[in-house]
Image (cartoon, rainbow, N blue to C red):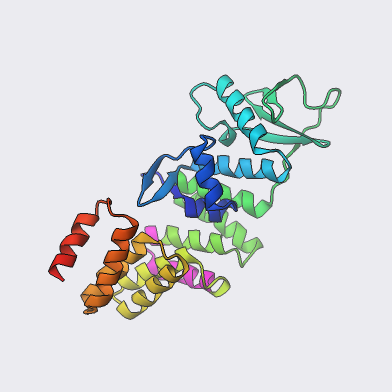
């Protein structure tokens, strides 16, 4: 199954607010794939589109102009829902242009004959090298090419040893491959740099639970919830593990919180049955 990213992950990876993500979804600029547990879910192509929109906004292109450009690109790119994920962006002097399939547009969506008449040199959008490597790693993850993704994250960490998201993603790959001890090392490294990283805390809790280190699992699930009180999966897992450890009142609190956050989920019936028993 291909990985989908929720709005919290998009916000962290791209650097835009969840409010912006929801708004861009509402206006049809970048539409969700689906909704699950109150979270909007997007695929990798849409993740790239979010990054492109952010870069255009940073360079002073208004959202209105971006929407107009996207509408035009959709008209010349039939069947491609998110052209900005497949569009290259160039600068020439103080002008910004977009290129797809040998066609060139300005941000208003107007077709261009050339970026700079009489000039053959096109200068690509400047990008941070770590960011480029990180997105390449994400793309390999999306294609389930785990070794290639690991190499990209290793390259980042060789350049920038405190790159938290690269550490967390390395841990995620190792966890998926069953190398729990190695994954734990990366999550711990990430938490030394950013103790409040939600995903690192949650995934480390999962590892402790796998190893039957219940007290540590509870501690790190609680930390993940402290940093993100609407983290439904963390509430679910914490309630389940508290029930097993005999803390019935604690389990009830987190079951009820889960139902508040996601009353229609596939687990809601199971949770209500648990509450009736407890």
Q: Is residue 135 depicted above or below 25 in this figure?
A: below
180 lies left or right of 275: right
Whether 178 is among the magenta residues is: yes
Residue 177 in view, yes or no: no
Vertical order, 239 against 68 (above or below): below
Residue 249 in sight here: yes
Between 171 and 191, the residue placed more toward the observer is: 191
Screen quadrant of the C terminus: bottom left
Q: Position of residue 264 (x, y in %)?
A: 27, 50
Q: Where, by quadrant of the figure, is residue 71 drawn?
A: top right
State the image quarter where residue 217 is shown: bottom left
Q: Residue at x 82, y 37 (%)?
A: 94
| Residue 206 in the image, given as x and y percentages of width and height | 35, 67
Vertical relation: 168 (above or below) 122? below
Q: Which residues are magenta?
A: 175-191
Residue 192 place in picture, x, y as percent: 55, 75
Residue at figure coordinates x 25%, y 71% from the top left = 252
Q: Is residue 132 left or right of residue 21?
A: right
Q: Nearer the viewer, residue 117 or 268?
A: 268
Secondary structure character of the magenta stretch overall: helix
Q: Splitting the image into 4 quarters, where does residue 76 fall? A: top right
């Amino acid at each position: 199954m291909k990985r989908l990213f929720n709005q919290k992950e998009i916000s962290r990876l791209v650097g835009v607010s969840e409010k912006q993500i929801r708004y861009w979804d509402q206006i049809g600029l970048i539409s969700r794939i689906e909704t699950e547990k109150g979270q909007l879910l997007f695929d990798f192509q849409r993740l790239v589109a979010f990054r492109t929109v952010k870069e255009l906004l940073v360079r002073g292109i208004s959202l209105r102009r971006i929407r107009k450009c996207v509408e035009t690109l959709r008209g010349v790119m039939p069947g491609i829902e998110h052209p900005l994920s497949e569009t290259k962006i160039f600068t020439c002097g103080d002008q910004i242009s977009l290129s797809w399939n040998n066609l060139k547009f300005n941000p208003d969506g107007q077709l261009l004959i050339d970026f700079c008449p009489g000039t053959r040199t096109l200068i690509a959008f400047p990008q941070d090298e770590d960011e480029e490597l990180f997105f390449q790693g994400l793309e390999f993850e999306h294609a389930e090419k785990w070794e290639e993704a690991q190499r990209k994250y290793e390259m980042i960490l060789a350049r920038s040893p405190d790159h938290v998201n690269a550490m967390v993603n390395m841990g995620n790959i190792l966890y998926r491959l069953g190398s729990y001890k190695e994954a734990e090392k990366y999550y711990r490294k990430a938490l030394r740099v950013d103790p409040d990283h939600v995903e690192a805390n949650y995934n480390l809790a999962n590892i402790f639970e796998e190893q039957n280190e219940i007290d540590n699992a509870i501690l790190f699930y609680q930390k993940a919830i402290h940093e993100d009180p609407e983290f439904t999966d963390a509430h679910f897992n914490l309630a389940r593990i508290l029930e097993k450890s005999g803390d019935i009142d604690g389990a009830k609190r987190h079951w009820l919180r889960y139902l508040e956050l996601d009353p229609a989920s596939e687990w809601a019936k199971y949770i209500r049955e648990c509450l009736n028993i407890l």
